[in-house]
Image: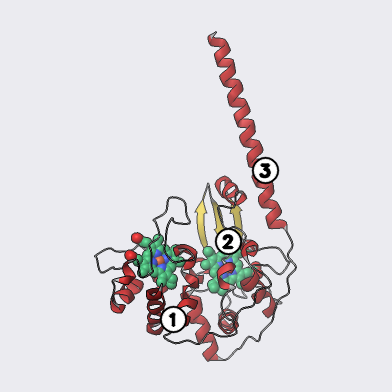
Amino acid sequence: MLRKILKWITGGIGVLVALILIFYFLMYMVVSNKRDKTYNVEVRMFDIPSDSASIAEGAHIYATKGCADCHGEDLSGKTFLEDGMVGTIRAANLTFGKGGRPADYTDRDWILALRHGIKTDGKPLVIMPSYEYCKLADHDLANLIAYCKSVPAVDAEPALIKLGPLGTVLSGLDKLPLIPAEQIDHKAQYPQKIERSVSVEYGKYLTLSCTGCHKPNLKGGDNIVPGGTPVRDITASGNIGKWTLDQFIKVLRTGATPDGRQLKNEDMPWQMTKNYTDEELQALYLYLKTL
Ligand code: HEC
Ligand code: HEC
């Protein structure tokens, strides 16, 4: 009798292991197919300036859109994820140094990466949040590209995308935004320029950097990373409804809240928002209060 039960159990475990292996193989194939797909999109071109004022504006966009978190302050690329289960990801070297942009990397290639999430060879970029950057106005994208092209060349390792077992399964199940190109409407039209001013419209435009975590309605909810700190409501129904402009600015520049909490930069990236100008923070506050 005991022997029979043991046989059942080992048999059961064998079947379970086989099922897990089949499932993992399927997920692996799904992810490989996604990454191997070739995209053929029409890239709408615009001029990239090279004067110092435009480059300075581009540097500000680089600092306020979180690029440095993955590509580093010197644009040479960083290994921003190193986890046996999820994977190891190193962002591209954006300079023209060794391991970086090839000498023939054109303006079209920059726009293709930022607006469409696609590499020069037509394959999709991985993890690079182009679904956010595609919504930048032409004017801002042009200045950003002007800045990237102007920085000194740095020799560094090229991009590395190595998914671990958990990363593969989560990507296969679409729980991780692995392929930005899949989330982009490649035919969408974007504005040429959004006037920079203390206006609700400009504030709304700036929340393109907040909705990825705070959700499209900015009411917060679960963290995109399973088990991460819950994301707060930043509309008038949250604390923003109570905070003065000065208090709001202090939160976004230092992470210190009026009720005495210290937000961690890993949760709420205030090292990025501290670079926003007064005008930008005022516009954000104005817009968030209307929600
Ligand atoms: C969450 C991390 C992350 C952020 C933030 C990020 N990138 Fe990337 N980026 C990557 C990764 C990873 C790659 C390489 C992807 C690949 O090769 O599949 C990449 C690739 C690129 C490429 C394409 C290089 C090529 O192979 O054609 C460009 C251009 C680029 N990033 C620019 C930017 C700019 C500009 C910003 C800010 C507006 C930015 N990135 C923000 C992770 C990031
Ligand atoms: C990478 C994800 C992420 C991004 C991007 C992000 N936030 Fe947050 N934010 C959080 C998380 C998580 C919290 C909650 C932190 C906590 O409770 O400790 C938070 C908290 C806040 C708070 C404090 C709210 C309160 O009641 O304490 C404000 C204000 C805020 N975010 C504004 C913004 C704005 C404005 C933007 C865009 C410019 C933005 N955040 C972008 C993740 C993010």
Q: Residue type at mark 2?
A: Ile
**For mark 1, what is the residue?**
200
Quadrant assignment for the N terminus: top right
Mark whose residue sits in front, 1 or 3: 1
Mark 2 residue CB less than 8 A from any atom of ligand 1: yes
Local secondary structure at mark 2 = loop
Q: Which mark is residue 127?
A: 2
Which residue does the image show at 43% across and 84% down from the upper left?
199
Do the CB atoms of the residues marked 2 and 1 lie less than 8 Å apart? no
> Residue beneath label 3, please?
26
Q: Secondary structure at mark 1?
A: helix
The reply to whether discs 1 and 3 touch (Cβ–Cβ < 8 Å) is no
Q: Nearer the viewer, mark 2 or mark 1?
A: 1
Residue type highlighted by circle 1:
Val
Numbered tag placed on residue 65 in the rendering: none
Residue 215 visible in the picture? yes
Q: x, y (%) of residue 58?
A: 53, 82
Q: Position of residue 172 (x, y in %)?
A: 62, 49
Q: Is residue 184 left or right of residue 65?
A: right
